[in-house]
């Protein structure tokens, strides 16, 4: 597939206290950014379970964006440090699976940084477009050989049953 | 099951299994006679008689309980899973392979073609000048020979057919197997769809002393002498006990070896590996991104294998592309 | 037209399918043993830290995880170029002897032995451990159960778990034993020796005193003159844990004795399109197909082969029994497949004696059970005798000890070709002019079972799956008749 016409599906998990507001702000200020990111609000980056990320990818997302308050400014004190450690470990793991570095990224954006958030989204979408689709769901499909083989077994066993009874 | 009632029917089956689940079942010892008293064992390939054709002839739902171990990697295994599902009232995914794919599930990092390449083309002790590979159908001078089709992906029993219960462990400890059998006999099974097991973590059963989990460096098991009394994770070893379901009695930590996670995730956790990853991330003693990165890269060279040793097949992780990583 | 199959054959640790083709005259034309599964450990272990291998490869086989655990652990010693302290080697060998004794007990009483003890003509439903009890007395059942229970308990005590131990490390083991544990191990070991002696007595009383059985063992139907392989110590005595591999020819003369690390110079594996399991042969002799004799590179790796390939047993009682066996069967080497059951009992006795020797070794409770590796990891080959044949693990890693290459040749694989040949020969002797009776198919099974084949191991998937199915096919191959010894 040529990447030019490719519209990536992206999920963005945003912290309620900062980035989600930043996104709001960007929206009301009519700052333009691509519509590819489906934003999901989470109370804090500390609540972003890394399993959300892999789940999104396995359901067909081509990239996942995480955003929280700047280090030191988390509404729940140090939860975003936790998020940071998890993020690094998750990225280490995704790299081992061959998932490109750009596909999952964590941004720190405060409630006031609507413009910066829009920039981040724009940049992120452009990067994923360059990479092309991830194809995780397709890589789980079995070939047609499977159904044929199953049918063959059923048929063979039925023949034997007839002989026996 | 009360006295005087007709005997139930029990089937035990193994798909892509190592047989350890059966060995562990035999470990209930003479209690197996109690099982035989309450059930006609209509199939148990490792220990008793029973033919596929007899199962095929049964009415749907005629088997009361089927304990099914092993994952699904071939057409033959998928067929048996479907057959036993149809014929059984209660189907139990028995052990880690059937429940979450277990170690053979790590095969999902690759596909059939890359696996065949290693085994039949690149192995260092091979004599295969013509590049022969096993085929579903082979014409030999005397006729045709069939092999089941080998799939790209190993799936769990639950990903193949609907499963009523799961029994965790690789293998489940004999005592836990007996507990499950008692629950079946006394009709005290939990809600369908649940795991038959406890709902705490290995840490709760572990006798090691715990203080504070703060780690600047992870160690590989061969690198350090282990303090026999202190928590292994606090000593920097990647112990999966922290995010693994209890039930074994913390056997591995008791011989100084970190838990490798064979009992799978606790109740309510969809993804064992991510739960473990989160738990491990939270003990890293740093707030500096570069330092965090260094600690991780130095100490955890194989994150997929370390966090998803037993649950890759069950997880959301997928191959990089069809041709394997 | 009818289809003929035996399915599933029970008491086999693994799954396989045998197809027997008849020619126009109704005689056996050919025979194929198909292994219907593959797990691909060689592929997916690549990328894992090498020290995970004792735990990963355990899952190749739940019947003999201890063998994989040990072969892997020994390979790790080599990967890290580390020499374990002598107490660690002794602990490992003691653990391994306990495992061997437990496994051989299971086979003799529950899997293969009943064919003999209960009798080859007995209905299949009786040829199991219950049949043995009926024949030998209630007492034996208790003894067998106790032996198995004790064995598993000690394996758990040492390795952490009864199935899939978590114990081996490059340079040693993760934990040693206390004096109290040692006492327990010794006490159980002394009982085990008595049990082994008792088992040999059972064999003598029931099998050897029955001339019909002896004729069956020594009869041509179950005889194959192939090469034999087994691990030996520096005195050419049988050893399960460590040593050199010795191969003797059909005439009993030594062909070669080599260090397991050189396995590639001596053994190569063929691929056939109709089985997922490869077929190893001796390179020095060459692959000539599924035939025996000194010009064919087919070799066997069974308890009997190990005895054939050695000059004796390293413990006194087992040595006596070794001599007795060869005296009775007409000298070395013995090629009668069914004598494998006898050899297995000789090995059982050796394993129990070795167990006690090690449990009474003053070093066994030493706290020095580990050497921490310091060298850069690279490549290592680990080899042990598994109950079902020589087991080889070969790893290559990068400088961090992450696996880049894995090769495994497991016990049963070694016997892949001979099993096929034995079944064919049995079938040829017993199926004539299209006449197949139930009793005859029993015999085909017996030939098969003497090897105690473990296809789980071999396919790196164990006992599983469509156990064994025997199809008798007509020349057109299309349609087959079903004949089952289990049919009413
Ligand atoms: S769960 Fe473990 S013991 Fe059971 S079949 Fe799978 S690998 Fe073997
Ligand atoms: S992390 Fe491991 S060693 Fe520590 S308490 Fe939990 S199970 Fe025990
Ligand atoms: S400690 Fe962990 S790996 Fe060991 S048996 Fe228990 S759950 Fe399994
Ligand atoms: S509240 Fe925004 S990251 Fe914690």
Image (cartoon, rainbow, N blue to C red):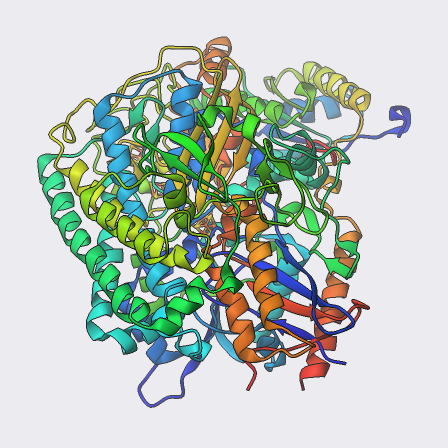
Where residue A115 appears, as percent x and y from the top left, is 71, 15
Which quadrant, please, contains the N terminus of chain C? bottom right
**Whether residue C30 is situated above or below residue B243 in the rendered picture:** below
Determine the residue located farthest toward the bottom in the rendered image: B4
Left or right of B230 on screen, residue B55: right
Where residue A137 appears, as percent x and y from the top left, is 72, 41
Which quadrant, please, contains the C terminus of chain C? bottom right
Left or right of C467 on screen, residue B177: left
Residue B260 shows in the view: no
**Whether residue C129 is situated above or below residue B7 in the rendered picture:** above
Left or right of C227 on screen, residue B255: left
Left or right of A43 on screen, residue B134: right
Most foreground residue, C458 or B263: C458
Where residue C172 appears, as percent x and y from the top left, is 30, 25
Q: Determine the residue positioned at 43% across, 73% down.
A: C120
Most foreground residue, C398 or C148: C148
Q: Quadrant of residue C279?
A: top right
Most foreground residue, B319 or C391: C391
Q: Disc count in the image?
A: 0
Residue B314 shows in the view: yes
**Whether residue B234 is situated above or below residue A155 in the rendered picture:** above
Q: Determine the residue positioned at 45% across, 57% down.
A: C336
Most foreground residue, A128 or C55: C55
**Whether residue C401 is situated above or below residue B177 in the rendered picture:** above
Where residue C476 appears, as percent x and y from the top left, is 82, 68
Q: Determine the residue positioned at 32% across, 68% down.
A: C207
């Amino acid at each position: 597939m040529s990447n030019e016409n490719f519209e990536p599906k992206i999920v963005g998990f945003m912290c309620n206290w900062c980035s989600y507001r930043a996104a709001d702000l960007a929206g009301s200020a009519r700052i333009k950014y691509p519509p590819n990111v489906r934003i999901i609000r989470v109370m804090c980056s500390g609540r972003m379970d890394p399993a959300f990320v892999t789940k999104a990818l396995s359901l067909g997302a081509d990239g996942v964006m995480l955003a929280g308050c700047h280090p030191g400014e988390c509404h729940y004190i140090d939860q975003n440090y936790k998020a940071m450690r998890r993020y690094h470990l998750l990225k280490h793991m995704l790299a081992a699976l061959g998932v490109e570095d750009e596909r999952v990224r964590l941004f720190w954006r405060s409630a006031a940084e609507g413009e910066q958030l829009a920039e981040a989204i724009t940049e992120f979408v452009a990067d994923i477009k360059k990479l092309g689709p991830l194809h995780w769901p397709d890589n789980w499909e079995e070939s047609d050989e499977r159904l044929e083989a199953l049918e063959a077994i059923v048929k063979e066993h039925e023949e034997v049953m007839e002989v026996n009874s | 099951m009360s006295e005087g009632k007709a005997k139930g029917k029990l089937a035990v089956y193994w798909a892509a299994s190592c047989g350890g689940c059966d060995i562990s079942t035999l470990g209930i010892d003479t209690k197996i006679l109690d099982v035989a008293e309450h059930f006609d064992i209509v199939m148990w390939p490792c220990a008793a008689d029973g033919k596929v054709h007899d199962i095929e002839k049964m009415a749907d739902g005629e088997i009361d309980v089927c304990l099914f171990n092993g994952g699904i990697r071939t057409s033959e295994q998928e067929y048996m899973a479907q057959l036993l599902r149809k014929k059984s009232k209660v189907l139990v995914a028995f052990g880690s392979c059937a429940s979450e794919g277990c170690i053979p599930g790590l095969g999902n990092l690759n596909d059939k073609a890359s696996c065949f390449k290693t085994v039949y083309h690149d192995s260092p002790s091979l004599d295969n000048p013509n590049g022969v590979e096993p085929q579903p159908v082979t014409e030999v001078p005397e006729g045709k020979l069939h092999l089941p089709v080998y799939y790209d992906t190993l799936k769990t029993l639950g990903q193949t057919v609907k499963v009523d219960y799961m029994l965790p462990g690789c293998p489940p400890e004999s005592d836990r197997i007996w507990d499950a059998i008692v629950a079946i006999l006394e009709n005290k099974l939990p809600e369908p769809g649940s795991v038959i097991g406890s709902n705490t973590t290995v840490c709760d059963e572990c006798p090691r002393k715990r203080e504070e989990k703060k780690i600047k460096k992870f160690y590989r098991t061969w690198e350090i002498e282990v303090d026999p009394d202190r928590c292994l994770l606090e000593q920097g070893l990647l112990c999966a006990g922290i995010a693994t379901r209890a039930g074994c009695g913390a056997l591995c930590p008791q011989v100084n070896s970190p838990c490798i996670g064979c009992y799978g995730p606790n109740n309510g956790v969809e993804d064992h590996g991510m739960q473990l990853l989160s738990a491990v991330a939270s003990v890293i003693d740093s707030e500096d991104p570069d330092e965090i990165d260094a600690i991780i890269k130095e100490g955890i060279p194989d994150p997929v294998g370390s966090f998803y040793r037993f649950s890759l097949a069950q997880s959301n992780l997928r191959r990089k592309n069809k041709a394997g990583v | 037209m009818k289809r003929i199959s035996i399915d599933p054959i029970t008491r086999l640790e693994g799954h396989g399918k045998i197809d027997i083709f008849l020619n126009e005259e109704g005689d056996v034309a050919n025979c194929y043993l198909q292994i219907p599964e593959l797990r691909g450990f060689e592929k997916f272990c690549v990328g894992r830290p090498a020290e995970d291998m004792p735990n990963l490869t355990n899952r190749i086989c739940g019947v003999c995880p201890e063998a994989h655990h040990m072969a892997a652990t020994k390979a790790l010693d080599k990967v890290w170029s580390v020499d374990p302290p002598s107490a660690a080697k002794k602990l490992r060998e003691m653990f391994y002897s306990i495992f061997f004794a437990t496994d051989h007990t299971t086979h003799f009483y529950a899997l293969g032995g009943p064919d003999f003890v209960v009798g080859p003509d007995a209905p299949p439903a009786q040829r199991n451990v219950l049949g043995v009890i009926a024949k030998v007395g209630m007492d034996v059942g208790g003894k067998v159960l106790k032996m198995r229970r004790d064995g598993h308990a000690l394996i758990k005590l040492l390795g952490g778990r009864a199935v899939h131990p978590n114990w081996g490390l490059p340079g040693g083991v993760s934990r040693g034993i206390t004096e109290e544990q040692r006492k327990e191990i010794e006490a159980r070991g002394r009982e085990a020796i008595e049990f082994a002696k008792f088992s040999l007595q059972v064999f003598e009383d029931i099998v050897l005193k029955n001339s019909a059985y002896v004729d069956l063992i020594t009869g041509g139907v179950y005889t194959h003159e192939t090469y034999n392989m087994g691990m030996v110590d520096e005195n050419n005595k049988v050893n399960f844990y460590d040593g050199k591999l010795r191969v003797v020819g059909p005439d009993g003369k030594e062909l070669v004795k080599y260090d397991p690390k050189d396995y590639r110079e001596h053994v190569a594996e063929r691929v056939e399109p109709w089985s997922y399991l490869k077929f190893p042969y001796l390179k020095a002799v060459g692959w000539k197909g599924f035939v025996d004799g000194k010009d064919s590179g087919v070799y066997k790796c069974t308890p009997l082969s190990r005895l054939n390939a050695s000059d004796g047993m390293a413990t006194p009682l087992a040595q006596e029994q070794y001599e007795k066996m060869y005296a009775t069967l007409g000298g070395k080497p013995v090629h009668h497949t069914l004598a494998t059951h006898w050899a297995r009992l000789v090995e059982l006795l050796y394993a129990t004696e070795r167990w006690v020797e090690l449990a009474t070794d003053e070093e066994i409770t030493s706290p020095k059970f580990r050497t921490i590796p310091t060298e850069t990891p690279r490549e290592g080959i680990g080899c042990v005798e598994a109950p079902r044949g020589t087991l080889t693990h070969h790893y290559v890693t990068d400088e961090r000890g992450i696996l880049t290459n894995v090769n495994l040749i497991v016990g049963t694989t070694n016997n892949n070709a001979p099993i096929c040949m034995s079944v064919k020969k049995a079938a040829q002797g017993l199926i004539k002019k299209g006449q197949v009776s139930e009793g005859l198919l029993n015999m085909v099974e017996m030939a098969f079972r003497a090897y105690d084949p473990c296809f789980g191991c071999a396919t790196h998937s164990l006992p599983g799956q469509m156990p064994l199915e025997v199809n008798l096919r007509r020349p057109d191959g299309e349609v087959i008749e079903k004949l089952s010894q289990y049919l009413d």
